[in-house]
Image: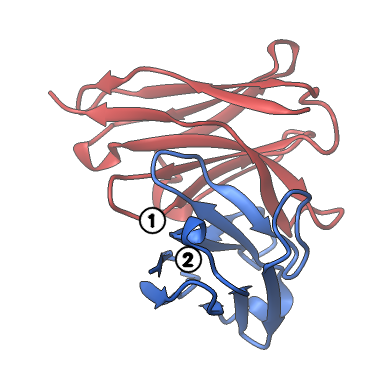
Amino acid sequence: SYELTQPPSLSVSPGQTARITCSGDEMPKKYASWYQRKSGQAPLLVIYEDSRRPSGIPERFSGSSSGTMATLTISGAQVDDEADYYCYSTDTKGEHRGIFGGGTKLTVL
Amino acid sequence: QVTLKESGPVLVKPTETLTLTCTVSGSSLSNAKMSVSWIRQPPGKALEWLAYISANDEKSYTTSLSNRLTISKDTSKSQVVLTMSNMDPVDTATYYCARTYCSSPSCYDNYMDVWGKGTTVTVSS
């Protein structure tokens, strides 16, 4: 079955750049989106269609995709960005089947 | 402004069938942009996509649970219902519904832009 692979954890200091990767064989054919999940809150869309940012999401959040890897970049990470981040894409087998990556725990301290 | 709200039992027993309801406000389920997905997150684990239903009633399920899941909708009530049969303690999770926005006419590319707050379900005897 199709899988999206993320690193389990990443730690950066405040003000540094955090890059979270998501790899999948079908990435070249599909868009990726990214979700921030803070404890006790519903997931929040931060990037869609690889690199588009919803209104209200700070500019320090950006996304890119190249080959089999999508990347979420947080430029100048803040303590408030500490959360779990999940990538999402869809199966290429002609159905609307979605899939999440395993999630990356971002620590900012 | 579109909002979604999940509702259902807090506690179910093993082998029972779970029925969850997602009530949508601010848009009609017949709106072409109003597809809905269900997602869950067990304690300490990752998000898991479960099922999808489109405005024109196309449905899709995660492969591993396809024999236990049924998704349907009642447009007149603005509700999307997910049933999961033969519940097990490993199904203990917070269950979310989310508006699924299509990036392509087929909606084979999509993303979830509006989420409900989730409802927590515990499976225990």
Q: Residues within 10 Å of mark 2 (few under 14, many from 20)?
A: many
Q: Is residue B69 visible?
A: yes
Residue A54 in the image: above or below residue B29: below
Residue reaching furthest front? A15
Please say if the residues under marks 1 and 2 sit with CB atoms less than 8 Å apart.
Answer: yes
Residue B84 in the image: above or below residue A58: above
- Amino acid on which disc 2 is placed: Gly
Q: Nearer the viewer, residue B16 or B24?
A: B24
Mark 1–mark 2 distance (CA, rounded to whole Å) = 8 Å
Instruction: Return the residue at label 1.
Output: B46
**x and y percent of residue A108 in the render?**
42, 68
Q: Which chain is red?
A: B
Query: Residue placed at 47% from the left, 31% from the top?
Result: B118
Q: Quadrant of the C terminus of chain B?
A: top left
- Compared across the picture, whether B122 is left or right of B30 comes to left
Q: Chain of mark 1?
A: B
Discs 1 and 2 carry the same chain letter: no
- Amino acid on which disc 1 is placed: Ala
Residue reaching furthest bottom? A67
Q: Is residue B84 visible?
A: no
- On residue A98, the disc is none
- On residue A101, the disc is 2
Quarter-of-image position of residue A91: bottom right
Residue B110 in the image: above or below residue B74: below
Q: Chain of mark 2?
A: A
**x and y percent of residue A53 in the render?**
75, 60
Residue reaching furthest left? B125
Q: Nearer the viewer, residue B83 or A45?
A: A45
Query: Residue placed at 70% from the left, 58% from the top?
Result: A58
**x and y percent of residue A11 in the render?**
39, 75
**Chain A display color:** blue
Q: Quadrant of the N terminus of chain B?
A: top right
